[in-house]
Structures are given as structure tokens and as C-alpha cells.
Amino acid sequence: MTTDIEVARTVTLKKIGEIADKAGIPAESVFTHGRHLAKLDLDYVEQLRGKPDGHLILVTAINPTPPGEGKTTTTIGLGDALNRIGKRAVVALREPSLGPVFGRKGGATGGGRAQVAPMEAINLHFTGDFHAITAAHNLLAAMLDNHIYWGNALDIDLRAITWRRVADVNDRALRKITIGLGEGENGLPRETGFDITVASEVMAILCLADDLVDLQARLARIVVARKRDGTPVTAGDLQAAGAMAALLRDAIQPNLVQTLEHNPVLVHGGPFANIAHGCNSVIATRTAMKLGDFAVTEAGFGADLGAEKFFDIKCRSAGLTPSAVVIVATLRALKYQGGAPLKNVTEPNAEILARGLASLGRHIENMQRYGVPVVVGINHFAGDTDAEHAQLAKFCADKFGVKAIVCRHWAKGSAGAEELAHEVVALTQKTSNFAPLYALDLPLKDKIETIARSIYHAGGIALSARAEKDLARFEREGWNNLPVCIAKTPYSFSADETLLGAPEGHILPVREVRLSAGAGFVVAICGNVMTMPGLPRAPSANLIHLDAHGRIEGLF
Amino acid sequence: MTTDIEVARTVTLKKIGEIADKAGIPAESVFTHGRHLAKLDLDYVEQLRGKPDGHLILVTAINPTPPGEGKTTTTIGLGDALNRIGKRAVVALREPSLGPVFGRKGGATGGGRAQVAPMEAINLHFTGDFHAITAAHNLLAAMLDNHIYWGNALDIDLRAITWRRVADVNDRALRKITIGLGEGENGLPRETGFDITVASEVMAILCLADDLVDLQARLARIVVARKRDGTPVTAGDLQAAGAMAALLRDAIQPNLVQTLEHNPVLVHGGPFANIAHGCNSVIATRTAMKLGDFAVTEAGFGADLGAEKFFDIKCRSAGLTPSAVVIVATLRALKYQGGAPLKNVTEPNAEILARGLASLGRHIENMQRYGVPVVVGINHFAGDTDAEHAQLAKFCADKFGVKAIVCRHWAKGSAGAEELAHEVVALTQKTSNFAPLYALDLPLKDKIETIARSIYHAGGIALSARAEKDLARFEREGWNNLPVCIAKTPYSFSADETLLGAPEGHILPVREVRLSAGAGFVVAICGNVMTMPGLPRAPSANLIHLDAHGRIEGLF
């Protein structure tokens, strides 16, 4: 089988200046980074505000399964297909995290003939955005401990420091650490830890900020600790926000790359989809909507987490109106949701598929609840049968009036997603009645409950005593109008990852709540959330190396 | 007074492509990073090998003092002045460390009219080299702990792990930490710590590597720990070197920027000058020698540490022959060396200056010992008197046959360093009889002693029992042919920072020795060496911010 990198290397990329030119971006607004990457001048991005918006298309998916769905490839394939049928389309994607590239995940630049390139650069340092976020995050941490070291004038309670440190590496040994050891010259010993960079609130802030002024203001609002009287301590109190913003000044510029078919793609930002909202930057999405008549973007995990947050956090906060939603599914993933063991998901089985369709149906229904037209994209795999495709299509048409279209972009590039592109265009002729799920003036607890009942079909929520107390405190302190960001397993509609399909009546346990005041949401932690991955026994890093010509091998 | 950044902003920089063109670099070998930064294609750098070498000029200084010397400004001013008098000169400098920028140090891009630009970019993330080094270093650390977590097949002795982690931030709380806390799922608890990125052996390796093949081979040789049987464990044993090299593939490309007078400067790499050798990359120096008839570069700290390592480690390992040495001094610094209290160093005082000149004389003598022609550059400060300049010049001429030339590049740019430039050109007409101080086949202990006696004028060395034992082990294990890298205070010829002037007969205490097998030297630690700085009570980060136009303010 041909690997993704082998496919990518059969294509001669165009100079990024040509791609920018094709997208209508003037050369003086393009800051090239080598031959194939560029950042866009933020002044130019600002000037685009006057232009009318293109249609915003969200690509989401059913809950992730081991056999995989192909959300990113579908996003890229759809973008290429829209261009193929004569539309001006720009894709907006998240940047991959460096850490997992050396674990087992591989990159996050699509696959087959639906890839963004150059994958080596995008998957490694890219234009340095995540490094800038790491630096800004850790500068704040250093300034916090430095403040305490020099006398703690703000009277910070050492037991109430919530700001950890970050690194863009899978390093389980850093999850829980004690710092400040020594003879006093290193500060006060205290327990803390490192998260992976994508879990940083600075990442979420960068992705939700309107512009540099908003960025600096949001950074100043980050709550890092509590004083001994219980009141919050912010990055602004520590006089850290300005220096952090200076470190992020270039990182906030959206990055331009190309698909293997030489269409423009903005790859920018990549917050976690559990403790954060999981979408690329508002700035990139907005820019894609100005440059393209169609902007195609994706959200993290399945639609229950990713699309919900895309709508209720990102679109609401940025004032974006999505025109259509594509829900990506595969026969094998649906059969897994229907209860097939992993080894059997490639075998045709109408009964198990029918059971799995309940899960897809739930997602369609949820998306329709937001008032946005829906289409299902069936990501084709070798071995799929026409009968199963027909069964799937009939289910979607009969129950929801929604088309389910087989897509072969992985094997064929844009030619494989033409039909999907035509349906997306057709959907954008309909009116989008987009509205968020809940009003911001609902109490925080009710917002969590609304999501749990409406989207997850839970019977209710169960707050721990601590979560209850903290929510009340956030309300009291004036954060009652923030949206909520649910951190739960992506593998089920419930908080129990083994409950596949479309479970009903389960209870969503809220163990803990956290305030991301700079990003502008309250995180509800439901179950265990891992914010610092570990490496597997045989990490892919073992195989990555430079060949005699300095070319990177082993990256996939 | 006008600040450096204000001076810099009066100059309209040229596009980096124009600077590259002026330096004779073909456009297709220039990877621009925005308008004013570029990396050079390593293939192009390789192709330059066939060209003849320009003259290599080292700028070094007397031991650093609180009133300052101005080594970087002199390096830049001399480069500009050589260009002014019609020579083709290229400067090669170290990259600044991000950490100290937020402390109190400010940037490291020169000052006054002798600056490299754009200083905001160079002092912050620049082209991401240090972030790449951080990532490569910490990937190795994660792979080490991951190896232990999954069963420790190499039988690594947890008490004998020497590889720490790094971050490019001044964060004293990370100096001494315990990692791997928790219930076992985070690995085994052990004590370790973070150093600042410039202290990473990966930094030293990047700066000494010949090319990508050599880089990968050096990375594989890094010793990170010992097995329980005492034998070394390398990055190669952990199968980490290839992935680390992949992370460094772009970082090894030299960076091109410009002076305020639009002359080309390569700014690349920046290892610590105590536990490492303290010079910019071999690749940048070599490239400067190929592009220029004169390559002007600097070494860290004073000549006792910086120039010694430049000659005995860098020039020897890379096969470079320096043509001339400039020793930078100021009247105020010499008076400080002569015993004047800091508050009095600006007052004329012939007697105290005469005492301080002993220190300068020692440095001149040391440099002449290497067989390289010498000139002293007197960095002019307002308030300097002609009588003092004359006294200094007479001392250098009478005792060493060396010129001491007053330089005003800070105030006047290249016009202020013309006389120095002419003398440097004259010196390069003489034959350089460059030879390193010691032979590599001397025992490691004798190498340390040779440096101590010859350069520091010590009466001898005193090895701790542990250092003695470890040196014997390194000899036994086959590292006997490495050069040594002394880590001692830069403020004195001795290991006692209060011993100013030209002390004699002191004993150099070697507390500990460390193996940098990848970089290719054995470090002798003499006294306390700080590898993770802290922030001051009121760090400069407090003042740095973005103005309403997104311009960085408060950086200096």
C-alpha cells in the first residue's frame, strides 16, 4: 500500500505565493516561511472585514471509533471538490500537535489524495505557533512563581494555584511533579504538573481572539490562582499579559498552505476538544469565509462534542452563521457503533449496521436542532458494499430527509467528492436558521444540563459537591454568562466510553468544573480527562530519521 | 537618551532578499521568513565548500564587568566598517536566548548604531531554532522516561540519569523538581530538573555539527544515563537520535538578517559559554567565511573562557584558522578591573587604569600565545579622556606591539570603526600561526591543567575525588581524546569572581566533570554554575506589551 507521504511526494507543490495569488491575497500581505508555508498579514486580514461572507460549511462526524471515520480527509476532499466544480472554496483546519507525532498517532494533515502539504513541515514545527503558545504559557507560570518568590505581595494561596506548565511532547512523567525543591533559592516547593501545549488556555484564547487587542485583553483575564481570601488572581494582576501577547504577535497570523490539488488551506490553532472547544482559530475561519465563497472547516471529535462547541462557543462568540453541516461516517465505524467486534467491522451485516445507524441518526437530529441543513458524507473504504450504502442512504432520507453521499476523495481526490460538493452547494441555497442550543443567561448548571439532555439524551446530570460549590462561586463572581465546555469521553454520547450506539437516560457525572476566563468558557469535567499523553512502548519516534540527503523518513 | 529600539526604528530595513542578493546568495537558496529574516538552504551552504575561505576575525573581550564592554556592538560595527572601506564582510553572531529577554538583560542584538535587525523578531522567537532544540531535547527526555516506564530493558540506573529537561524561560522553580509522581501510571518518581535551552547539549551539538549527517551521528552519541553495570546509555540506544535530527532539520540552516547599515549577518545558534563553548554555529561561521572576504564573529564572555574555547574547541574541531583577534575593552571596565568602585569608573584615574591594564595585558598575551595577530578595540563612552586612551594605547604598543584603537560605532555606526577595520585588514596581511593550546592526546586532567596554568595563570588545579574518578572513567571509556570545556565564573581569570585584574598562583578547583559526548567535549565545573536563571523582582516582562497597532513596546 502507498503511504500518505509517498502519495504526497508524487505531487510537486506550487510556491505558496502562487497559492496566495490564486486566493486573491496581495503579495505584500503574504509572509512566506520557506517555499510552501506562509503567514498572512493581520492588517490585511482586518481589511477583509468589509467583504461579504462566503458560506461556512462545518464537517463533523459520528463518535470516533478505532476503525476511523476520516473527518479531515473529507474536509480537504470537499474543499478540493468545490473548487473542482468551479466554486471558490478555502479550507480551514487545525494545526497538528507535535507531541503525538512521535507517539503513534502520526500526523493530522489528511490522507490519500486528500492531504494538505507539506506534511513534514505542518506536522513538525510548522510556523512556530505552538512553540509561541508554549513560551507564553510558561512565561506566565514563571512570573507566578517569581511573584511568590519575591514576597507574594498578592497573597496568593499556594494551595489554590491552577495554572500549570505546558510542553508539546507526550511525557507522562511530567503529569504530576513537585517544583521549587532545594534550599529556598528555588522558591517554595509545591505540587503541579505539565499539560500538553494544545491543552493550554492560551491555545483556546488564540483561537477565539478577534484581533491582537482582544488577544491581550483575554490573556489578562486568565485566572491562574486564588488569593488567601479566595478572590481570583489573573495574568493581568501579575502584569504578564503584555509580554505574553508580544510572544503571540506572529502566532495569531493565520497560516496558508495548499492541498495536493493546489487549493488554499488555512491551518491555524488547535485547542484540545475536551477541556477546550477543539476548532481552528476564529481568525482563520473568518479569513476563509472572506477569501472563499465557501469556507470548509472541521470540529474536533464527534458532533456531540465538536459540533456542539463549534456552534455554542465558537460561532456564537465570533458571530458566525454556518450554512451547512457534513456528518462524516463510515460503514465500518457504524457497524462498530452497532456492536460489531473490531475484527468483524469490514464484513457486511445489515442488522448490525441498522443498530449503528441509531448513532448516526442521533447526530443528524442534533445538528438539525441547530437549524442548519445537513448532509451525510460516507467515507468510502475498499470492501464497502452497495447494499450497505443504500441501506444507509435510505435511513437518512426516510427518517431525516437528508442525503448520504458516498465519497472517494481518499482514493480519487476532488473527483471522488464531487457529488458531496454539489449537495453542499444545494444546501446553501436553503436558509440556515442557525441558533445556539442555549441562552447565555441561563445558570451555568442549566447550560450543562441542557447539553446533556438535548445532545447526549442523558436523563440528567450529577454534580460532585465540589463542582456544585465552584459553579455557584463562578456565578457569584460574574462568570454566569459564559458558555460551558464539556470535557467527556468522545467515544460515546454518554460519559461512559463503552456505551456505544445511541444510549438514553444515562446520567452525566460532573466531577469538577474549571474556569477558562480568558478563553471565555467554564469547563465541566465529566470523567477522566488526560491532558498530558504518554508515549507507547514502541513510539513512532523510534523510526523517524533523516536519510543521507537530509530527507525526513518514517513520518506518517 | 534614545533607546536601541528607537534608533532601530529610524532605519527602514531592506527586504532580506536584497541583502541575500548583495551577499551573492542565489534567490532559490533563500528561504525567507517574513520580510526581514531568512534561512539559507543547506545544499547551497554545502556547495560553498569549494570556494576559498575569507579571513576569520574573532572579536573577544576582557572579563565582563558591570559597566559593560560592548563585544557584540564592536563585532557589528567592525563588520559594517569593513564593508564601508570596500571589503566584503559578513558577521556571524549567536542567537539571543528568549528567557533572559523577559528578565532584565534585554536583547542581544547590539546597540546604538551598531545593531542587527529586526531586534523584536531576533530577540523573541526568531526562526524557531531554539524551540526546535527544546523540542528535540525534551523528546529525548520523554523517550528515556518512557523506556523506563515500559520495563527498562536497558537496565538504566535511575540514580545515574544525567539528562535533564530544558525550557527557554527563566524559571527558578524548575531547577530542582520531582517527576513521575502519582499512582504508578506516570512512571517512577525521581529527582531531576530543567535547564534553560541554551544550556542543552543539543544546542552545543547543533553549533558544532558539520552537516545533517554529522548532526544525527552526534545526537546518537549523547550519553543520557548509566546502566546498573555502569556503562553509558546513549540517545542512540534509545533510538531517539533520528527523530531529534528530524526536529532539527530546519534549525541547522543558518539565519540571515541585516545590520542597520544593511550588511549581511548570520545569526545562528547560541550555546552557553560556561558548560558549553559559547559561539555561534560552525555552519554560520563557515558560510560567513565563504560569502565574505572577511568573516567577523564573537565568542562568549571574556577571552579566558570564550576565545580559549573558540580556538581549542570550535576552530580545532571545524578546522578553522583565525586570521586576527580583536580584544574589546572600555576604560570604565578596565578601571573596574583595576579596583575602582562601580560608582567611580567614569572618573579619570591613571593609577587605577594602570592596574586594570594588567588584566588586558594578560588577555593580549594569551591571544598571542595562539599565534594570531591581535588588536585592541576601545569601545568609546562619553566621558572618556584622550589621556586615558593614550595611556592604554601606549601600554599595548610598548608591551605587546599591539595597537589599541578607539571605536565609536555605537554613536556613529561604521564611520566610528573605520580605523579598527583598517588595522584588522593590515593584521590579515601578516601570517597567522594559529595552533590550539594543547594536544588532544594529553590526558584530560592535563588539558584542564594546561588551560589553568597557561591562560588563567593558576598555580595548579584541585580535583574533587568525584571529578578525579569520573575523569579516569572517561579516559578508560575512550573519551580521552576530547577537548575540555571549562565552566567557571567569567568575571575573573580565577574561579573566584572577586579576584579582579590579573591574579597569579590561584588554584582552580574542579568540583565535577561532565561528559558531552555528542558535542564532543568534557566539561570541568569549577565553582557554581547556574544553568537555569531566575527572574528579578521586577522583570522586564512587566513592561513589555502590544500597543493599539500591535507593535511590541517595552522590549530593549
Image: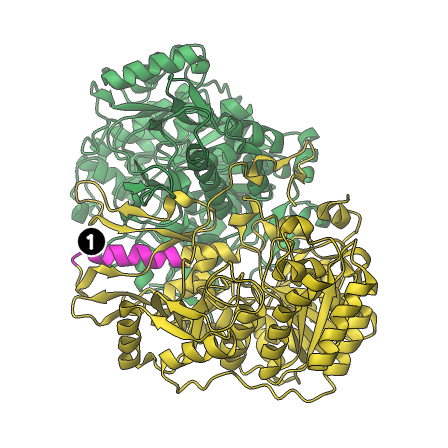
Chain colours: A green, B yellow
Decide: is B417 above or below A89. Answer: below
Quick check: B81 left or right of A303? right
Q: Mark 1 falls within which chain?
A: B
Q: Position of residue A502 (x, y in %)?
A: 24, 27
Q: Is residue A117 visible?
A: no
| Quadrant position of the C terminus of chain A in the picture | bottom left
Tell whether position A135 is magenta. no
* Secondary structure, magenta segment, majority class: helix
Residue A198, by quadrant, is: top left
Q: Give the extent of the magenta segment.
A: B137-151
Tell whether position B143 is magenta. yes
The kind of residue on which mark 1 rests is Tyr
| Quadrant position of the N terminus of chain A in the picture | bottom left
Residue A18, by quadrant, is: bottom right
Residue B291, by quadrant, is: bottom right
Q: Position of residue A134 (x, y in %)?
A: 46, 44
Decide: is A151 above or below B160. Answer: above
Q: Is residue A555 visible?
A: yes
Question: In the current view of this chain or complex, which residue is farthest to the front?
Answer: B351
Q: Position of residue A515 (x, y in %)?
A: 39, 24
Give the class, few, some or many, for how many residues have Cα within 10 Å of label 1's Cα (few <14, many ≥20): many
Quick check: A394 left or right of A220? left
Q: Nearer the viewer, residue B84 or B290?
A: B84
| Residue bearing mark 1 | B149
Q: Position of residue A363 (x, y in %)?
A: 33, 27
Decide: is A187 above or below B378. Answer: above
Quick check: B537 left or right of A104? right
Q: Nearer the viewer, residue A413 or B138?
A: B138
Q: In the image, what residue occupies the spot 48% across and 58% down?
A: B198
Q: Nearer the viewer, residue B264 or A125?
A: B264
